[in-house]
Image (cartoon, rainbow, N blue to C red):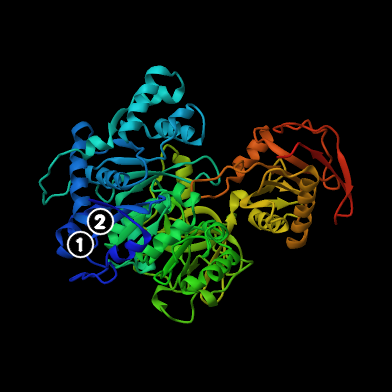
Amino acid sequence: MCCCVLKHSQYSSAVYNLQGMSCENYDPCFPDQPVVDRYLPIWASQPSFSNKPAFVWAKDSPSGLTWTSLTYSDLNAAVEAMASKLLCSLNRGDVILVLCSPGLRLVKVIFACQRAGLVAVPLVPPDLSLAGSGAAHHHLLRAISQAKPKAAVADRSYVEAVRSSASSANDELVRSTKKLQWLSVEHLEDSVSYSSSSSYSGCGPDDTYLIQYTSGATGVPKPVLVTAGAAAHNVRAARTAYDLQPSSVIVSWLPQYHDCGLMFLLLTVVSGATCVLASPVAFLHRPRLWLELVTEFRATCTPVPAFALPLTVKRGSCDRGKLPLKLGSLTNLIVINEPVYKSPVDEFIEEFSAAGIEPSCISPSYGLAENCTYVSTSWPREELGGANRYPNMPSYKQLLPSARLGKPYAEEDIVIVVVDEATFEPVEDGVEGEIWVSSASNASGYLGHPSLTREVFNARILGTASRCFVRTGDRGVVRGKERYLYVTGRSSDVIVSGEKRLLHPHYIEHAAHGSSPRHLRGGCIVAFGEDGGRVTAAAVLVAELQGNGLGMETCRKICEAIREGVRKEEEGVSVGRVVLVEKGSIPKTTSGKPRRWLAKRMLMEGSMPFVFEARFEDIRQVSDGEGRGGRGIAHGEVASSSAGGGGSFKFLPFSCL
């Protein structure tokens, strides 16, 4: 491994000439292996790959960019040595929690678990100083209870903190961690030399190698059982779809523990590419870092959640840094998180067109944990430079497509069907239904949930008995000659109006933000039906405020604007209640998806502090409003006439930020 600290002016001349490297005897479809880890010794043994960086870990600092690289040869050696040490105290098939900090050590451990034949459960390590509280603590406790691991691997300082906590505390999480064997990743890295063997004793294609939790966007996260063979098929499908090669350079700041962030670790190795990694925290602190890494490493591919585009436009635009951005190397900007709105993508392209970004690189994509991760993309890889690229890509109700079903890749055998949930029959093109996916990438099921596994993973089209489908719970519609698939929302989030009209909350949220973009945080608004079920006469909106110090009159006007904006943009949709909350109040997944179900529960239970609430009397009866969850209640009510609803409404004002 090598580590350097370079200033921007020095770095461009020091970057590896990855795009121009020689790759003799390389065919992107050869040598396909049944398990991803088995690619490593192949690359490590080839002269063109052994000293090539597989992964680079980049850090942002005032003195310049700090980076550490890990070659294919070093990675293979480290994985073999760590696997041997793991098997000194564990047996093949044992479950192990992976709680390492993001970085190259985490990459090594992920592959070492596969080579040792262990079942890895990667998790974000919770902050032990916040004992017993926080989503990460609850998630760790859930994983220990469900997966029943025998051991956990973490940074040495974290292991010491766990042992210290275990001797001085009494909460449930501490009692659970005391039962585990704790291994430090530094101990696994230490010293051991190894001798390569011609035989492979790690995971077989049918062995479970990963327990990957769902994001929690639609309910409590569920443990998905992923076999090593399904994961290998999934990243091979993605490699083909995105046209990744050994000359590809990937930049990713996504969390490495699950979903797209984890998949790109595997995808890098299958492709023989180089992946530049950074911390999600570093991106959120300074979004422009993402594009600077693309510039410095001349990246060709980068996956980002949809929320990253408007955030980077707002806080990381072309004129906000010392380093001139050069984005012309990008051939694949993968936009994940469904649904994908067209307008933020257009704004991003417009903002960074001066930096050389090509609209043709935009790759709206779709995936879910139940299919390992990757499902599809609408990026037409076989039409490089053709007319059917992003500028001409059609949209539907403001959304971009996430697949083209007119030209499926038969060799990857991923079948996508839109189905009527009531009849289990495919719907006609143009009719919305539930998206079903059948693929060798399908996971095995949910750990400890046999009935739910049968319902979700063993669905069949009515009248057929051959092919099993995964019911994604996502809704979509297929349109046009190319049969573009548009992911329109999630079944569990749908609001059913009193007229039995199906309302997707993201449209309501989008209209609400457009009504007061200066005062509301984009992507931090949730809409759902009023308590008492999905059928409702009016929607409830919870919105995070952009800044501090907003007065009561400003909050009142924001609520009025939200209601009127939704009424204008979404015909027939009424807003019965608006709740303004502090920044960071709305729960989200690690990839930035709003957890509407949890926000609704918190609001109904009174555990979400809010600073202003408006209830509209012409829609529902106003309660006496004791301000559950609120603080600093200013007693009294403000009455006003409706801004356009034809009735009156009342506000229950709270002291504002």
> In the rendered view, does 144 fall on the left or right side of 94?
right
Residue type at mark 1? Answer: Phe
Instruction: Kindly identify the residue that appears in the image at 31 percent across and 54 percent down.
Output: 56
Q: Answer whether labels 1 and 2 touch (C-beta < 8 Å).
A: no
Image height of 536 relative to 488, above or below: above
Q: Residue 425, relative to residue 559: is it above or below?
A: below
Image side of residue 443 versus residue 613, left or right: left
What residue sits 86% from the left and 41% below the top? 638
Q: Which residue is mark 2?
A: 34
**Amino acid type at mark 2:** Pro
Q: Nearer the viewer, residue 467 or 131?
A: 131
The residue labelled by disc 1 is 49
Q: Is residue 378 visible?
A: yes
Does residue 372 appear in this view? Answer: no
Query: Is 161 on the left-hand or right-hand side of 339?
Result: left
Q: Position of residue 572 (x, y in %)?
A: 77, 59
